[in-house]
Image (cartoon, rainbow, N blue to C red):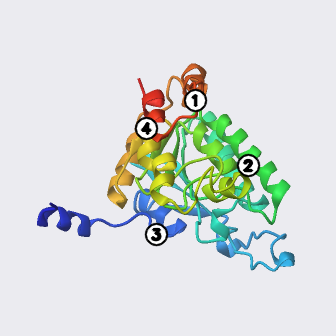
Amino acid sequence: MTSATDWAARLARTSFIELDARARAAALLDAGAAHELCGPFDRIESPWLEPQGVVPQSDDGVVVVRGRLGGRPAVVIAIEQAFQGGGIGEVSGAKIATALSLAARDSRGGATTAAVLLLETGGVRLQEANLGLATVAEVCSALLELRPLAPVVGVIAGALGCFGGMSIAAGLCSKLIMTEEGRLGLDGPAVIESEAGVAELDASDHPLIWSITGGEQRTRTGFADELVLDDVAALRSAVIGAVAQGVPAEHRSQRIGELRAGIEAARPPGPHDVVAVGAPR
């Protein structure tokens, strides 16, 4: 039974998930040290949405804020989950890739600049199709350019999760932090159901979905590094800690032997089987 103290602690928390992208970025960075780049008043919009009947957003759904994190130079890149399901298009992807490249330039110049990716996205924006795929490739390339120089920390906090091409970017991060509510996968449940049928995966079965792609499962199987409460203070502390650890000697995506072992099961594994195979050693 939950005690009164537990409930008081829960009520005292400030939900990170309930904040929009701009507020999430501001909540992580040190107070008074944040400056937004390519903000809404610069009106850098996608030219492809309005002709298709979609109202564009002035920042194209990506917020880039430069500042300090625990006293260290950092850039926070936050995807707005409320705009087109966090879909990545030509402009929003270019903002992410350019921010990562600029952080790499500064890091090479002696000002080591960490990057924090707040990943709430279903992947490529369908209205921009091939352009979105190309820009996700640019994001991954820029991430690989930065991560030998400075830590790149991914955060997947909300129930929208991180899917599609951006889940590859999540896998390339130096550290990946999730909440229990977050999800991570290459293909979303609705996509799998539409392509393979409900017998393959029932997208309405939430307990099943979270047992496969949820934050707890992904952390236990080594696809994420830390499971954190949905709380601004807890997430900020976890991100600062991940940045302080610096660049790892070996990134998860380089541990080919461990990754291969996770897919060489004799039969299609269930959620509990995956834990046994993929748990960090």
Q: Amino acid at mark 1?
A: Arg
Residue position for label 4 = 272
Q: Nearer the viewer, mark 1 or mark 2?
A: 1
Q: Nearer the viewer, residue 3 or 202?
A: 202
Residue position for label 3 = 19
Residue position for label 2 = 136
Residue 263: image location, x then y, percent: 59, 28
Q: Is residue 140 left or right of residue 32?
A: right
Q: Nearer the viewer, mark 2 or mark 4?
A: 4
Q: Secondary structure at mark 1?
A: loop
Mark found first going from the N terminus, 4 or 3: 3
Quadrant in the picture for the N terminus? bottom left
Q: Secondary structure at mark 2?
A: helix
Distance from Cα at disc 4 to Cα at disc 3 = 33 Å
The reply to whether callout 1 and callout 2 are in contact (CB within 8 Å) is no
Residue position for label 1 = 267
The reply to whether callout 4 and callout 3 are in contact (CB within 8 Å) is no
Q: Residues within 10 Å of mark 1 (few under 14, many from 20)?
A: few
Is 170 situated above or below 59?
Answer: above
Q: Quadrant of residue 36?
A: bottom right
Quadrant in the picture for the C terminus? top left
Mark found first going from the N terminus, 2 or 4: 2
